[in-house]
Image (tube, rainbow, N blue to C red):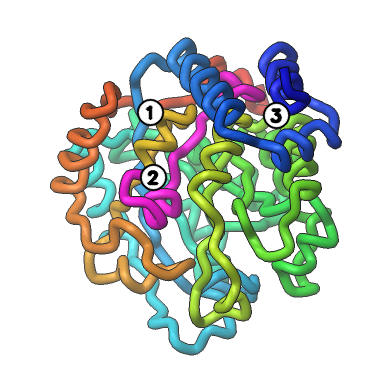
C-alpha cells in the first residue's frame, strides 16, 4: 500500500489528519486514492442525507461593495461595473418565484454595501420571514460587528455564509488589501457561531499564491471551527481585477477537496458551487458524486444577473428560474439524485437551543 493511500485510509478512519499529512495527501494524489476518497465521501453523504439535494435560492441584491479584494469582479475600484441595488419589493418578488418552484431557503448575497444599514437589513429580513415563515434566510453580506449580527439573528436570519478564503495570514494578505485581516475574518465567524447561526466558511481552490501547505492550514482551521456549511469552489479570474492573468483553479482539485471535507465533516452542508459548474458543464453533478449535497441556483432578476460577476463566465446568468429548476432536476435524476422542497438545515441544529439567548 502506498504512503498516500495509508494517509487517505487514516483520514477515513479518524476524520482528520496532521498538517503535513494533509499536505502530502494533496501533493501525492493519484487516480486510485482520488476514487477511494470520492466513493467514500459519496457513501458518507448518502448515509446522512440519502440521495436528497437541498436547494438555496441566491438573491444577489446589491453589487456595490466598500472593499477592494484583488480577486473580485465587483471590487470597489472596478469602474466598469454597472452598480445596482434591489428594492424590497423586487427582493420579495424573487422570494415569491423561489417559493413557487419549491425553494425553502433564500440567500441574500451582496457586497458590503453601506446603503444597507442594519435597520434596512432587519426590515428586509422581517419582511421575508413574515411572508415565508417556513423558509430559512441565509445572509452572505460580509464582515460586521457583533451588534449587527445579533440584530439580524433576532430579526429572523438563520444562517450566515462568510468564506474565510484562506487560513494562512501571508496568503490572505496576497488576496486582500491591508484594510482587511484574517484575524478579523475569523473573529466574525466565531461571533456568528456564538450567536447561534448556522455558519458557513470556505475557500477558493487554486487562488493565486495557494499551496498544498496553505490548503492544509484551511483543513486544520475548518476542523477547529467545525462549521455547519463549507463552501469551496475553483478560483476563476476576472479580467477587470489584478488577477486577470492568473491561472484558474481546476475541477479535479476542487472535487478532491470536496471529498476530503465530506469525510472530515459527515453532516456538513456542502455545496456543489456555481463556480464548479462554470468551469465544467457537469461540474455540479460531479460535485454531488464527490460528496456535495447542496446546490444554489440563482433567483436574481434576469436584468441584473450579468451585473453580479465576481468572476468571468459565470454559469446560470441566462437561466430562467423555473426552467432552470426543471433542467437541474433532470440532470440530477440522471445520476440518481433528487432535489427536495425543504429548508435543509444542519442535522441537529435548533434555532432556540443553539442561540446564546436560549
Q: Nearer the viewer, residue 211 or 328?
A: 211
The picture places residue 290, in percent across and down from the top left corner, at 47, 30
Count neighbours of disc 1 (C-alpha within 10 A) and say few if under 14, some if 14 to 19, many if 20 or more.
some
Q: Position of residue 132 (x, y in %)?
A: 30, 36
Q: Which mark is residue 53?
A: none
Q: In the structure shown, which secondary structural element does the residue marked by tag 2 occupy? A: helix
Magenta-colored stretch includes residue 4: no
Q: Earlier in the sequence, mark 1 or mark 2?
A: 2
Badge 3 marks a residue whose secondary structure is: loop
Q: Quadrant of residue 63?
A: bottom left
Query: Is residue 303 in sight in this rendering?
Result: yes
Q: Residue 226: which numbered mark, if any? A: 3
Q: Could you tell me residue 346's position as x and y percent?
A: 52, 24
Question: Which is more foreground, mark 1 or mark 2?
Answer: 2
Cα distance in 3D space between marks 1 and 2: 24 Å
Quadrant in the picture for the C terminus = top right
As drawn, is 138 to the left or to the right of 209?
left
Which residue is found at the position 62% from the left and 56% from the top?
206
The residue singled out by tag 1 in the image is 343
Question: Along the horizontal axis of the image, is 258 left or right of 176?
Answer: left
Looking at the image, how many numbered discs can be counted on the residues? 3
Query: Magenta residues?
Result: 263-282
Question: How many C-alpha atoms fall within 10 Å of the one at disc 2: few (<14), some, or many (≥20)?
Answer: many
Amino acid at each position: 500500500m502506498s504512503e498516500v493511500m495509508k494517509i487517505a485510509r487514516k483520514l477515513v478512519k479518524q476524520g482528520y489528519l496532521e498538517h503535513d499529512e494533509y499536505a502530502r495527501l494533496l501533493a501525492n494524489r493519484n487516480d486510485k486514492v482520488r476514487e477511494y476518497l470520492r466513493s467514500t465521501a459519496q457513501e458518507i453523504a448518502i448515509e446522512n442525507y440519502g440521495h436528497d439535494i437541498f436547494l438555496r435560492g441566491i438573491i444577489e441584491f446589491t453589487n456595490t461593495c466598500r472593499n477592494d479584494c484583488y480577486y473580485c469582479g465587483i471590487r470597489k475600484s472596478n469602474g466598469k461595473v454597472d452598480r445596482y441595488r434591489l428594492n424590497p419589493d423586487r427582493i420579495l418578488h424573487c422570494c415569491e418565484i423561489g417559493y413557487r418552484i419549491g425553494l425553502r431557503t433564500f440567500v441574500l448575497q451582496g457586497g458590503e454595501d453601506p446603503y444597507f444599514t442594519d435597520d434596512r437589513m432587519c426590515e428586509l429580513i422581517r419582511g421575508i420571514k413574515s411572508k415565508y415563515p417556513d423558509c430559512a434566510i441565509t445572509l452572505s453580506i460580509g464582515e460586521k460587528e457583533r451588534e449587527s449580527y445579533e440584530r439580524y439573528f433576532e430579526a429572523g436570519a438563520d444562517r450566515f455564509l462568510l468564506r474565510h478564503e484562506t487560513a494562512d495570514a501571508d496568503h490572505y494578505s496576497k488576496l486582500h488589501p491591508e484594510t482587511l485581516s484574517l484575524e478579523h475574518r475569523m473573529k466574525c465567524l466565531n461571533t456568528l457561531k456564538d450567536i447561534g447561526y448556522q455558519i458557513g466558511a470556505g475557500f477558493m481552490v487554486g487562488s493565486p499564491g495557494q499551496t498544498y501547505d496553505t490548503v492544509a492550514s484551511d483543513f486544520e482551521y475548518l476542523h477547529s471551527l467545525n462549521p455547519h456549511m463549507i463552501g469551496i469552489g475553483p478560483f476563476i479570474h476576472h479580467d477587470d481585477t489584478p488577477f486577470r492573468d492568473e491561472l484558474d483553479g481546476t475541477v479535479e482539485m476542487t472535487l478532491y477537496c470536496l471529498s476530503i471535507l465530506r469525510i472530515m465533516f459527515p453532516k456538513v452542508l456542502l455545496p456543489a458551487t456555481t463556480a464548479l459548474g462554470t468551469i465544467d458543464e457537469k461540474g455540479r453533478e460531479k460535485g454531488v458524486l464527490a460528496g456535495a449535497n447542496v446546490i444554489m441556483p440563482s433567483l436574481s432578476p434576469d436584468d441584473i444577473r450579468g451585473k453580479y460577476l465576481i468572476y468571468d463566465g459565470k454559469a446560470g446568468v441566462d437561466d430562467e428560474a423555473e426552467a432552470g429548476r426543471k433542467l437541474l432536476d433532470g440532470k440530477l435524476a440522471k445520476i440518481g439524485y433528487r432535489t427536495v422542497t425543504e429548508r435543509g438545515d444542519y442535522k441537529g441544529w435548533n434555532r432556540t437551543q443553539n442561540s446564546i439567548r436560549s
